[in-house]
Image (tube, rainbow, N blue to C red):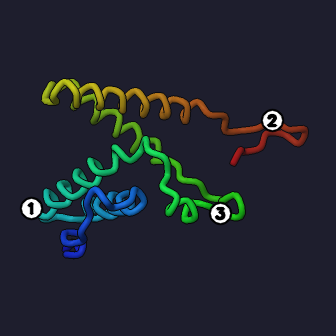
Amino acid sequence: MNTSNALFTTPFDHNTDFIDLADNCERFCEALVEETDPARKMALCGRLATSLALLRPMLLEPVPEYLQERLTVDAFPFIRPQFAPEPDQHCRYCEEITQLLISGVLAPEAARVMGDLLFELTGYFADQLKEPRWLRTDAGVALLG
């Protein structure tokens, strides 16, 4: 795939709001998955890393007033963001992070962060696998969801 040049030229900096930075991260990741050219993949990784670095300090700050209206709805949304990979893919994520930690190639701080991520992912994964799937009713057993 030939990624749109707009992804490489769209300006953003420390004045870009967190919503736009989050949108950037999403677009860079989507393009990264599809891109086949190694140089363009590396450039997308750089843009993603920069967006994430700019985004992180904003996450603990109050939402600016000018963005509050954009994040306000009149009715509870039916769809909420969730992390829901297929179980086999989720397991693969955990395996790959484990192998990365075993390899010892990460700097100590990066290894700690990846260990934290692995802890969160495996806990979520285990909870998902152990989640009830059927409900016993007077009419018999029914599939949940």
Q: Which residue is rendered at x = 33% and y = 64% of the image?
A: 27
In this orientation, which residue lies closer to the viewer: 83 or 137? Answer: 83
| Image disc number at residue 67 | none
Residue 85: where, in percent of width, then height? 45, 47
Quadrant in the rendering for residue 68: bottom right
Amino acid type of disc 2?
Arg
Decide if residue 54 is on the left or right side of residue 36. right
What is the spatial separation of the Cα atoms under label 3 and label 1, in whole angstroms?
41 Å
Q: Which residue is rendered at x = 43% and y = 31% of the image?
A: 120
Can residue 15 be seen in the rendering of this structure? yes
Q: Which residue is mark 2?
A: 136
Q: Earlier in the sequence, mark 3 or mark 2?
A: 3
Amino acid type of disc 1?
Ala
Amino acid type of disc 3?
Val
Residue 53: where, in percent of width, then height? 26, 47
Tell me the element at label 3: loop
Residue 8: where, in percent of width, then height? 19, 69
